[in-house]
Amino acid sequence: MKTSKFFINAFLSLAFVASFTSCSDDDENPEPVNEEELITNLTLTFSNIATPADVVTMTSVAPDGLEEGMTTENVSGNFTAGATYALSLAITNASETPADDVLNDDIIPEADEHFFVYGVNDLNLSLTRDAGDVDGPDGTKLGVNTTWVAGDASTGNLQIILVHEPDSVNDSNPFGSATGGSEDFNITFTGVSIL
């Protein structure tokens, strides 16, 4: 009888101790949080395919993030009428050291959740989403790799929007369109010229 009481007490003691050691603190291995990416700097670099020294650069800087709306834009250079340009995008978070490459670390790996929409107003520019562009939502082209053709002389605005988790997208018009979702940024560069 004493032996069975001993084994029962030992078993209950082990069960009691095991219940404490088997419980883990959820804070030790928290679920990763997929936070919205902070974007502080946007640079569009248009390089003339035939004349590499012919470059148009557009920058937008917002230390608190482009989505907050307090941005400073700058346009450097003019497009040459009749020339074809390749666009190179740089999208970063400069609040980190070194700056986080948001385009390559967040947007492209999550291409199915993003879509670039472009627009021009009073500016004679056309664009093509390149065949080698990154695949975006619903089999569309994301809008990272694009080619632009400058038409007749004009001065106007160029707009770029990054839509996050759009409900639907359409790239049948190369400038693109999207419904739903939220805007990671919506930037308009003014005073853009084709000479």
Image (cartoon, grey):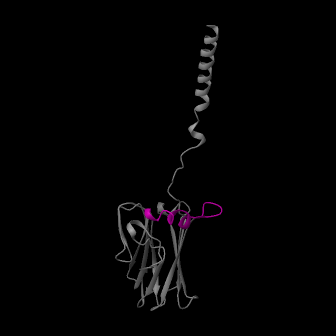
Say whether residue 179 is visible.
Answer: no
Up-down: is 50 above or below 58? below
Q: Position of residue 30 (x, y in %)?
A: 56, 44
Residue at 64% x, 13% y: name it: 6
Up-down: is 106 above or below 51? above
Residue at 59% x, 22% y: name it: 16
Say whether residue 139 is visible.
Answer: yes
**Observer-nearest residue: 42 or 29?**
29
Q: Left or right: where does residue 132 sit relative to residue 168?
A: right
Residue at 43% x, 64% y: name it: 112
**Observer-nearest residue: 88 or 26?**
26
Question: In what quadrant of the picture does the N terminus appear?
Answer: top right
Residue at 45% x, 77% y: name it: 190
**Observer-nearest residue: 25 or 179?**
25
Quick check: is 72 in the magenta stretch? no
> Image quarter for residue 143?
bottom left
How many numbered discs? 0
Magenta stretch in the rendered image: 93-113
Q: Position of residue 33 (x, y in %)?
A: 52, 50
Q: Position of residue 19 (x, y in %)?
A: 58, 27
Q: Position of residue 14 (x, y in %)?
A: 62, 23
> Image quarter for residue 27?
top right
**Observer-nearest residue: 158 or 87?**
87
Quick check: is 99 in the magenta stretch? yes
